[in-house]
Image (cartoon, rainbow, N blue to C red):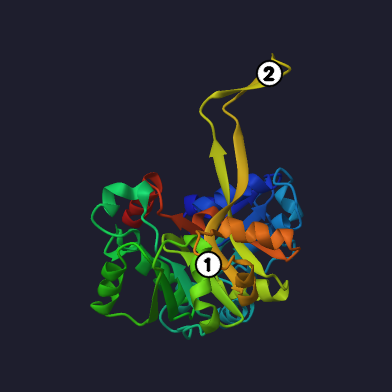
Amino acid sequence: MNDSVLATLQLQKGTSIKEAMKQLGKSSWKTLFLVDRNKRLLGSLTDGDIRRWILRDGKLDENVEKVCNKYPEYVEEGKYKIEIVKEIMVNKKMESIPVVDDSKVIREVLFWENIFGQEYKETKKELNVPVVIMAGGQGKRMSIFTKIWPKPLIPVGEKPVIELVMDSFYENGCDKFTLLLNHRAEMIQSYFDNTRHNYHIQYVQESIPLGTAGGLKLIYKDLPDTFFLSNCDTVIKGDYEEMFNFHRLHKNNITIIASYKHFSLPYGVIKKRYGKLEKIVEKPEYDHLVVTGLYVMQKKAIELIPKNNKEFHMPNLIEAMISSEKKVGIYPVNEKAWTDIGEMEKYKEAIRNMEL
């Protein structure tokens, strides 16, 4: 294995969780391996480890040793058998396993695709949870496109953004969709009516704009107890079954799929007290959990939406849930797993990523 590739898979002891998140976000791999100064294996780290830490309100400036798996799977150089590696990968759902020498120094990493090739084909997931997509907005922030297309049909590569959203669900075993439509509804329906796809689609048109949550009143009777709700321009690459199970396990009424976003200001920020300067913080950096626009919901949450024809948005519904002491949970995903195409800069970034 190339030394430069191996280096991207390794975390140095003493690295902060925040820095580990950044490295994991930049990497195309789902697992990093913690090593000491001599490159000896100490542990492994996945986004799931970080997620559990965040949900325990852990601080991101702590050392990564606090969250990593200190007993990672590995095989020994010159002693392992491919069949044993395959068995470990399948049974423990691992995509990579390090190979270490007698001193536990990582010499290479074995990857799923290299071990199995075309031999092992995973059966299609059958999550079979219905998905509601909010597709009625005008997309004013993307007016350069929405003068021509409705927001859900903004092209990203060879497909419109809403189809990329639906593809992500389909890959996770969901093929039943309800599209809540308003602005240029006939164009959206016409697109899918004249396109080959594997989805079962129900179209529900709002006579007037009802907001990102208000339209759910129109389909209340058709919904099961638990369903996914998504923006039409939010693409999440992740394990939707794990999100669903997390929601059910914690008995949430709504689970917000959130992403940690790293922000930096290119300015010196003034800190003042009673009109006097205390200090200037040069180019500060911040980390925040932000709403991605994907939710797992219980049908009964819709009962808190007012029975009128005024716009009612998801933040309004979530505030109503909290005021009613209903449980609202958070499921964090890696920043790299979330593609938001609702703003021009994010759109350009998505296009650049597709070209890599």
Is residue 101 at least partly visible in the picture? no
Give the SS element for disc 2. Answer: strand
Q: Name the one closer to the observer, 149 or 236.
A: 149
Mark in the foreground, 1 or 2: 2
Mark 1: which amino acid? Gly
Residue drawn at (52%, 71%) of the image: 216
- Report the residue marked by disc 1: 238
**Marks 1 and 2, how far apart at CA:** 42 Å
- Kind of residue at badge 2: Lys
Q: Residue at x 54, y 58 (%)?
A: 313
Q: Position of residue 51 (x, y in %)?
A: 66, 59
Mark seen at residue 279: 2
- Name which of mark 1 and mark 2 comes first in the sequence: 1
Name the side, left or right, on which 157 lies relative to 213: left
Q: Give the image location of residue 41, x and y in percent.
A: 68, 57
- Seen at 30% across and 58% down, the residue is 154
Q: Is residue 27 left or right of residue 21?
A: left
Q: Nearer the viewer, residue 218 or 282?
A: 218
Question: Number of callouts in the render?
Answer: 2
73 in relation to 337, above or below: below
Residue 261, horizontal then vertical, whole percent: 56, 47
